[in-house]
Amino acid sequence: MIKIKQTVHNNRLLTVVILFYMVLAVISPDKAGQALKGSLYYVKEMLMIMPVILVLTSLITAWVPRKTIENSFGSGSGVKGSILSFLLGSFSAGPIYAAFPVCKTLLEKGAGISNIVIILSTWAVIKVPMLLNEARFLSFRFMIIRWILTTVSIFLMGFIMSRMIKADDIPTGQLEEEQSGGLSINSSCCMGCGLCTKIAPDNFGMVSKRAVVLQPVCNEAQRIQVLEAIEKCPAKAIRNKAS
């Protein structure tokens, strides 16, 4: 019973949605069926796209040096960073919700607020495939004028938001010390594979499909196991300052 309550508490939004569908099914079964069909379509779309995005963010976190992100997209990257951000968003693939984990990862690696705004905005309204369809249905003249006005607005919005919001105001999920002793896991990078819990079960466990630190390293046997877990972690999310 306690486990069920905890599951409901951890998935409050999903619980509300399920209850809504149950009520709608009683009141209007036909509309409930149509709504469920539409929801399943978007769920299917997310299941096709999000695994790729999660792998991409894990690769950025593990393999792209922070200095590279700072130089390319950081607040000090200037005009170059704005142009790169604009191009990244313009040639992106997938719906806008796929941009959020990518932008969060870039922000954690040193990207500036202005460039994050530019990436999100261009991803949403200036993607190249979308422009081609816009020109086809609404005319090339309409598309190019709208593109110019939107582009100016995006750069202006990025500048204004960089003055109103600082990186410290945004929760980024940086390395969090789960216990004392320097052993920590970057929860935003963890893929939930559970490999660390199998290699070092005394030190790592799983909570809400993410690895957590159960206790710091207490002896030499645990230290060897933790080092092996760090080496084999596919997302490179584990750190041990004491090693």
Image (cartoon, grey):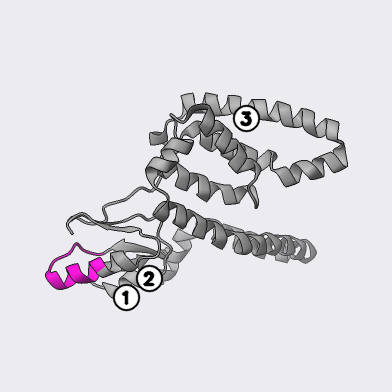
Extreme residue in the left direction:
219
Secondary structure beneath dot 1 equals helix
To which residue does mark 1 refer?
198
Q: Amino acid at mark 1?
A: Lys
To which residue does mark 2 refer?
194
* Residue 48 at x, y percent in the picture: 63, 63
Position of the N terminus by quadrant:
bottom left
Residue range in magenta is 214-227
Q: Amino acid at mark 3?
A: Ile
Q: Nearer the viewer, residue 157 or 170?
A: 157
Position of the C terminus by quadrant:
bottom left
Q: Is residue 125 magenta?
A: no
Q: Which numbered mark, 3 or 2, is in the foreground of this view?
A: 3
Label 2: how many Cα within 10 Å (few below 14, some 14–19, many 20+):
some
Up/down of 51 relative to 61, above or below = below
Q: Is residue 220 magenta?
A: yes
Q: Which is nearer the N-term, disc 1 or disc 3? A: 3
* Residue 149 at x, y percent in the picture: 72, 26
Residue at screen point 48% across, 63% down: 8
For the residues bearing labels 1 and 2, Cβ distance under 8 angstroms = yes
